[in-house]
Image (cartoon, grey):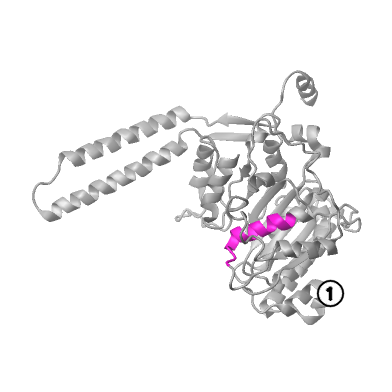
């Protein structure tokens, strides 16, 4: 098959993804037509039997008629969305054949805000699943934005950075899915067919359980013990914090991916791992998640400056280690790639009740509406699980003449030590940095209208 593709590649273009129309569209359109006829009959019936006496009857008729008009309009709009659903299929083998040595860097933004609502153990499970992507680790950089400014979250990140030296090679060796430790060990069984794998499996599971217990015990205590604070210089920052809404920028590079010493237990490089708590002052609006994302965009532009950005919420771990490669099949496609500004992944949920009577799984939105929106220009940006071009977030407009040279955008031009970067980047995360600038207006995520305007802005600039 691959030899055939190589022969075809000499004479014709082979895309990195393909688009297929949904099956059964004719049946769906016939179904919609029958519903449309039924709605028209109801409206005709309502108009034909207009009451002429009695105020109660007349007002009841008016209420019913306008309610039916409104729901008919809503139904009509939803059918427009679902009229032409399409599905995308990627060819990761073609991506590897053409670009394996030139794969771009990817910056991953994980956002958290409160260690009580979003427990640190949940946060680090998301972070570890991102670090364990099936992707060159030297081209991955994971940033945690902690808007709660919590030393408990920082402690959990420090423990996760140590555990990652065991977890990442374990994931790659056993090719496990998903790569969130909590999700994996909750359902996986010990591999009894191989004594060596079973021994390693038990060892890594014990490491995780011990780490989880220590983090949860510290979280329950409400503060990090003094002896642990002495282990890392970063804890010194919390000596100058008055509250979570009034503190200086805290930025620590826990793993410097450019450092030759940053290796896992198998001698392979580790992804860059950064903790950021941006500066907050009571007199300056922090703009919630949009403000956190903008600070991450600026800080990451100095540390790693990867051309692709993935943002996720801290409770959304990755259930597919090939997600990055799937997204790159769209961005790096020679014909259609330049037209794409962002790739939105659907969400999947756990702990849903059997009958899901409140539709917490969002199956209609993810499995029906998203493919329909994709057939009408693309799905909405829902605030998590989205890959962006950095240049799209920074306001660049794309055209057919604009081609990206992936070899040129892979790495930052100047390499600096972690200590120097920490000092320089603190300014980029200050609460006054974007004052009187286009940040939050024309550049990056909108501060005024949150995700709604950002969706439209991204669609217009790409």
Query: Which quarter of the picture shows residue 263?
Result: bottom right
**Quadrant position of residue 296:** bottom right
Residue 91 drawn above or below residue 163: above
Work out whether residue 187 can be spotted: no
Q: Quadrant of the N terminus?
A: top right
Residue 292 counted in the magenta span? yes
Does the magenta portion include 148?
A: no
Q: Quadrant of the C terminus?
A: top right
Q: Residue at x 68, y 72 (%)?
A: 150
Q: What x and y, as percent, mark residue 254?
A: 80, 63
What residue would you read off at disc 1?
231
For label 1, the SS is loop
Circle 1 packing at 10 Å, graded few (<14), some (14-19), many (20+), is: few
Tell me if 362 is positioned left or right of 384 in this view.
Answer: left
Q: Residue at x 58, y 45 (%)?
A: 458
Residue stretch rendered in magenta on the structure = 285-300
Residue at (73, 58) in percent of width and height: 299
């Amino acid at each position: 098959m691959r030899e055939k593709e190589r022969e075809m590649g000499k004479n014709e273009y082979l895309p990195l993804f393909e688009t297929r129309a949904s099956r059964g569209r004719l049946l769906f359109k016939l179904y919609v037509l029958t519903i449309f006829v039924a709605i028209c009959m109801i409206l005709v019936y309502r108009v034909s039997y207009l009451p002429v006496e009695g105020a109660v009857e007349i007002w009841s008729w008016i209420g019913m008629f306008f309610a039916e008009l409104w729901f008919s309009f809503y139904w009509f709009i939803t059918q427009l969305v679902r009229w032409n659903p399409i599905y995308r299929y990627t060819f990761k083998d073609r991506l590897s054949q053409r670009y394996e040595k030139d794969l771009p860097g990817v910056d991953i933004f994980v956002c958290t805000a409160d260690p009580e609502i979003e427990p640190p153990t949940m946060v680090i499970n998301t972070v570890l699943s991102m670090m364990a992507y099936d992707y060159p680790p030297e081209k991955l950089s994971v940033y945690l934005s902690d808007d709660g400014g919590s030393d408990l979250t920082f402690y959990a990140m420090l423990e996760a950075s140590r555990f990652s030296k065991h977890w990442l090679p374990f994931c790659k060796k056993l090719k496990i899915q998903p790569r969130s430790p909590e999700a994996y060990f909750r359902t996986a069984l010990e591999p009894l067919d191989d004594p060596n794998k079973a021994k390693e499996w038990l060892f890594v599971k014990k490491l995780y359980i011990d780490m989880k217990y220590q983090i949860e015990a510290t979280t329950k205590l409400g503060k990090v013990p003094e002896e642990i604070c002495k282990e890392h210089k970063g804890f010194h920052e919390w000596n100058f914090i008055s509250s979570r809404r009034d503190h200086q920028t805290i930025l620590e590079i826990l793993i410097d991916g450019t450092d030759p010493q940053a290796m896992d237990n198998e001698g392979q490089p580790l992804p860059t791992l950064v903790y950021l708590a941006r500066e907050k002052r009571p007199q300056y609006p922090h703009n919630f998640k949009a403000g956190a994302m903008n600070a991450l965009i600026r800080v990451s532009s100095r540390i790693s400056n990867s051309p692709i950005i993935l943002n996720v919420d801290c409770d959304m771990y990755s259930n597919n280690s090939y997600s990055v490669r799937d997204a790159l099949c769209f961005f790096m496609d020679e014909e259609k790639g330049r037209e794409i500004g962002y790739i939105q992944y659907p969400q999947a949920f756990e702990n849903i009740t059997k009958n899901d009577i409140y539709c917490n799984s969002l199956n209609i939105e993810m499995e029906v509406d998203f493919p329909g929106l994709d057939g009408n220009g693309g799905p909405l940006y829902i605030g998590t699980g989205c890959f962006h071009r950095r240049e799209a977030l920074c306001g660049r407009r794309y055209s057919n003449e604009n081609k990206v040279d992936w070899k040129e955008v892979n790495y930052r031009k100047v390499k600096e030590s972690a200590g120097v970067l920490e000092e320089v980047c603190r300014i980029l995360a200050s609460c006054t940095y974007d004052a009187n600038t286009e940040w939050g207006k024309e550049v990056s995520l909108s501060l005024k209208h949150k995700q709604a305007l950002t969706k439209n802005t991204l669609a217009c600039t790409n």
